[in-house]
Image: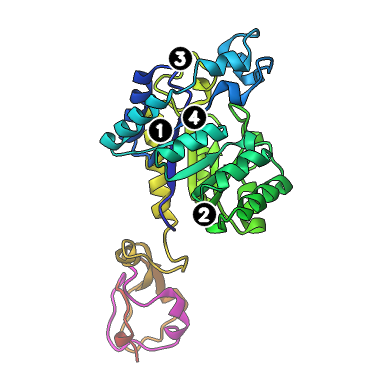
Amino acid sequence: MSKVLIIAEAGVNHNGDIEIAKRLIDAAADAKADFVKFQTFKADNLVSKTAKMASYQIKNLDNTEASQYNMLKKLEMPEDWHVELKEYCKDKGIEFMSTGFDEESIDLLDRLGCSMFKIPSGEITNKPYLQHVAKKGKKIILSTGMADMEEIRQAITLIKSEGVTAGQITVLHCNTEYPTPMSDVNLLAMNVIKNELDIAIGYSDHTLGIEVPIAAVALGAEIIEKHFTVDRSMPGPDHKASLEPDELAAMVKAIRNIEQAISGTGLKTPSISETANKAIARRSIHISNDIGVGHVILKGDLKMQRPGDGISPMLIDEVIGRSSNKALLKDYKLTFKDLD
């Protein structure tokens, strides 16, 4: 398989502070992720002033009074941040990426030269937005939290109608509860999407821990996206469902190990590293008691012992009934040259 693309999702975990944003870039680069991704939006374009927060946001912010608008307004990234952070990423050897939540934000990211666009789960039914993204003609990553197969199919059809090819699209299986209960992950749906839509697939993870994205790679995910933070105890809507830097590094390392583990041909043959173990671990036919010249070999004269570099026990029927052509001592490793 090709290398899994690992997106370290910084999101809004910068808390409106560019220095925290840079610390997030540092952590993602140190963890050896491929991309660090933020979120680009204008609160005025995204949400009405009366829209309520999601239950997980209320819980994580410990604030039942705040509106989505007020929360998001504090987390907007100014345009000059984008320029500075993209350059900072270049210096750190990691790709900059951001999810654009509205058409104005998509245009900004396009001007910055971002190589692909990420469509968040909430926009999968936003026809004008999907058309605007697709008309840019770039690679698209489509998250599918809260969506059913028909909605995913409709979104892909719409995107393709604007000239984007299937090869430019990767669909991420996703659940938008933060954190996602393990019982709601439904990871097998990822490959249902792949098989039914004939599309590249990945997984955007909101569970606690790193097990599920690792399992997703083993099942064929080509892209993994995972939220992270510099400190899970910080205030904010997403910190509590995010990895800390050491956990992010452990996830990346585990994914790279799984990549190697599933990169073989699929043919069941001994590997190069284990070939030398055959003689050590397998058995061959040995003599169980002293026998003389001309003795007709009986089953009771034989025992199966290591090492396995003599006659295979699978050939025992070719040994029984033959005569020894020399005296053989107990524990002797038999060869066909010893038999008439």
Q: CA distance from mark 2 to mark 1?
A: 27 Å
Q: CA distance from mark 4 to mark 2?
A: 21 Å
**Residue wearing tag 3:** 234
Where disc 2 sits, the SS reads: helix
Q: CA distance from mark 1 to mark 3?
A: 17 Å
Q: CA distance from mark 4 to mark 3?
A: 18 Å
**Residue wearing tag 2:** 168
The numbered disc on residue 146 is none
**Residue wearing tag 1:** 248
Where the N terminus falls, by quadrant? Answer: bottom left
* Residue located at (52% from left, 40% from top): 118
Left or right of 96? Residue 210 is: right
* Residue located at (61% from left, 36% from top): 121
Residue 321 forms part of the magenta stretch: yes
Q: Nearer the viewer, residue 42 or 240?
A: 42
Where disc 4 sits, the SS reads: strand
10 Å crowding of disc 1: few (<14), some (14-19), many (20+): many
Position above or below: 218 against 208? below
Q: Nearer the viewer, mark 1 or mark 3?
A: 3
User: Which percent across, then down, holds residue 252?
Assistant: 39, 40
